[in-house]
Image (cartoon, rainbow, N blue to C red):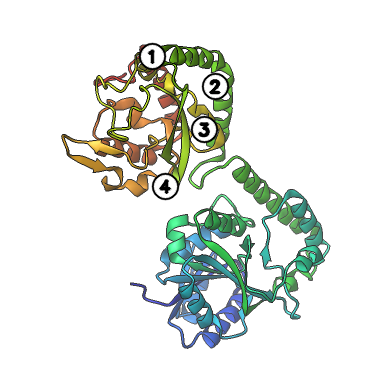
């Protein structure tokens, strides 16, 4: 049970005066609400300074990170230390200017499908800021960079948005972001690969993908004094550094979206998957034609077989395989685990399964981003484990099922290589979790190499040691 109604999380970096004013505004406007304030500091302070801060802000929970590792990592540390059902991420240069936080809490309670809410942001002069935005295209990004450093407001975005209307939006500014904890539990924390900028847009995109709405709620107004800083003189070196951070963060975002890189997946792993799958499709295409001819020759049935599989975070996708079973093989029993000398498997199918050639079309799934070359096996949604007649066990009943599906499934993996085909799922799950713990590029290379050896030996259907 949550100890507080709301947790305020502030990332601080050498801005104690701003922080002081922000905390004062919270205490003034939220006196009637049970809350906690967590400050995650990226500043490197002396022991004496830390003691002074702990004494002055005695009601605040401090996290001293020791060095500046970026906004997302600092915010995540604050989130991990929080306990409330709802969180409000605030920049230290923000000020609560009304007491409508209780109304926002009630709005969140009445709308459980909303994951993130952004209030109206105004600058020190009362001008509306573009705090709710469409996902940034490359053209929009270039325009914003020019406008920011020429001290112009992006009039195009402001003109296209009604800032007085409650509405669903693509994303809201991380300067003030109200977040549902249950949403974080499903979506995950901010992506720490962003040092600064774009982490808020990326987070909102992930909330949308996970079924949560992102809403702009102008009933609450927050003052954001960022424009005050930008109006002061800044060195050319600082401007160049800021521009570079903007550019690199947006480049990471574009790569992540276009290449469908997961939150726990490195850019290199995804690029490796794309390269290897593209080369594999082109190089093995003559083999595809031969396999298709043999399948058709055997019984005249369909060449390919589509199945629903469970992907990352339990999302369902369509997997493509060469058909290895007879027509209507699962009509009577449904999707059950294959067994030795399975009568549903045809003659061509046995050869395909022994060499894993029936899996070749899954290179398309890897190229699309549904799968990776290495990972847990892609389970079927309704698949059961046969443990005797009529004893069956649903996949979701296997312990730590959710942890297993937190990564992309793979064409090969630790369990696929080292365990017999009919090994109990519970044992395979342990190997899948071990892979998650030990995952590295070199382990992936080793498993791919061993997979080729098993294919050449025709031992993928072996009930004993494969390698």
Marks 3 and 1: which is nearer the front?
Answer: 1
At 56% from the left and 17% from the top, the residue drawn is 285
Q: Residues within 10 Å of mark 4 (few under 14, many from 20)?
A: some
Residue that mark 1 sits on? 348
Q: Nearer the N terminus, badge 1 or badge 2?
A: 2
Q: Nearer the N terminus, badge 3 or badge 1?
A: 1
Q: Is residue 341 above or below residue 34?
A: above
Q: Secondary structure at mark 2?
A: helix
Query: Residue 73: where, in percent of width, then height?
Result: 52, 57
Q: Between residue 71 and residue 371, name the one nearer to us.
A: 371
Query: Residue 22: where, in percent of width, then height?
Result: 59, 79
Query: Residue 202: where, in percent of width, then height?
Result: 59, 54
Q: Nearer the N terminus, badge 2 or badge 4?
A: 2
Q: Nearer the N terminus, badge 3 or badge 2?
A: 2
Cα–Cα gap, marks 1 and 4 = 32 Å
Residue that mark 3 sits on? 366
Marks 1 and 4: which is nearer the front?
Answer: 1
Marker disc for residue 314 = 4
């Amino acid at each position: 049970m949550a100890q507080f109604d709301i947790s305020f999380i502030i990332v601080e970096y050498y801005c104690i005066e701003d922080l002081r004013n922000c905390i004062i505004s919270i205490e003034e406007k939220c006196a009637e609400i049970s809350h906690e304030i967590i400050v995650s500091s990226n500043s490197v302070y002396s022991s004496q300074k830390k003691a002074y801060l702990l004494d002055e802000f005695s009601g605040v929970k401090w996290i001293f990170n020791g060095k500046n590792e970026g906004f997302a990592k600092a915010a995540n540390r604050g989130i991990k230390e929080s306990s409330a059902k709802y969180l409000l991420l605030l920049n230290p240069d923000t000020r609560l200017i009304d007491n409508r936080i209780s109304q926002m809490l009630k709005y969140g309670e009445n709308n459980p499908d909303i994951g993130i809410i952004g209030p109206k942001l105004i600058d020190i002069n009362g001008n509306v800021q573009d705090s709710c935005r469409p996902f940034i295209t490359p053209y929009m990004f270039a325009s914003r960079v020019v406008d920011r450093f020429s001290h112009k407001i992006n009039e195009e975005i402001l003109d296209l948005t009604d800032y007085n209307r409650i509405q669903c939006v693509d994303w809201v500014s991380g300067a003030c972001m109200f977040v549902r904890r249950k949403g974080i539990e499903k979506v995950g924390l901010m992506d720490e690969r962003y040092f600064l900028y774009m982490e808020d847009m990326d987070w909102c995109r992930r909330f949308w993908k996970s079924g949560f709405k992102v809403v702009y709620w102008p009933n609450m107004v927050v003052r954001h004094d960022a424009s005050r800083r930008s109006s002061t003189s800044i060195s050319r070196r600082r401007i160049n550094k800021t521009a570079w951070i903007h550019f690199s963060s947006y480049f990471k975002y574009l790569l992540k979206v276009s290449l469908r890189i997961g939150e726990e997946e490195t850019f290199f792993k995804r690029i490796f998957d794309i390269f290897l799958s593209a080369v594999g499709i082109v190089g093995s295409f003559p083999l595809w034609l031969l396999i298709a001819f043999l399948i058709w020759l055997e019984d005249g049935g369909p060449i390919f077989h589509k199945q629903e599989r469970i992907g990352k975070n339990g999302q369902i996708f369509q997997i493509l395989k060469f058909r290895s079973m007879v027509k209507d093989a699962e009509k009577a029993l449904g999707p059950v685990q294959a067994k030795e000398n399975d009568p549903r498997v045809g003659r061509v199918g046995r050869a395909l399964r022994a060499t894993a050639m029936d899996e070749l079309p899954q290179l398309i799934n890897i190229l699309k981003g549904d799968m990776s070359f290495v990972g847990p096996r892609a389970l079927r949604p309704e698949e059961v484990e046969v443990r005797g007649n009529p004893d069956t066990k649903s996949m979701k009943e296997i312990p730590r099922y959710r942890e297993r599906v937190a990564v992309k499934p793979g064409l090969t993996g630790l369990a696929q290589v080292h365990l017999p085909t009919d090994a109990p799922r519970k044992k395979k799950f342990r190997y899948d979790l071990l892979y998650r713990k030990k995952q590295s590029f070199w382990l992936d290379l080793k498993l791919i190499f061993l997979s080729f050896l098993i294919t050449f030996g025709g031992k993928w259907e072996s009930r004993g040691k494969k390698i």
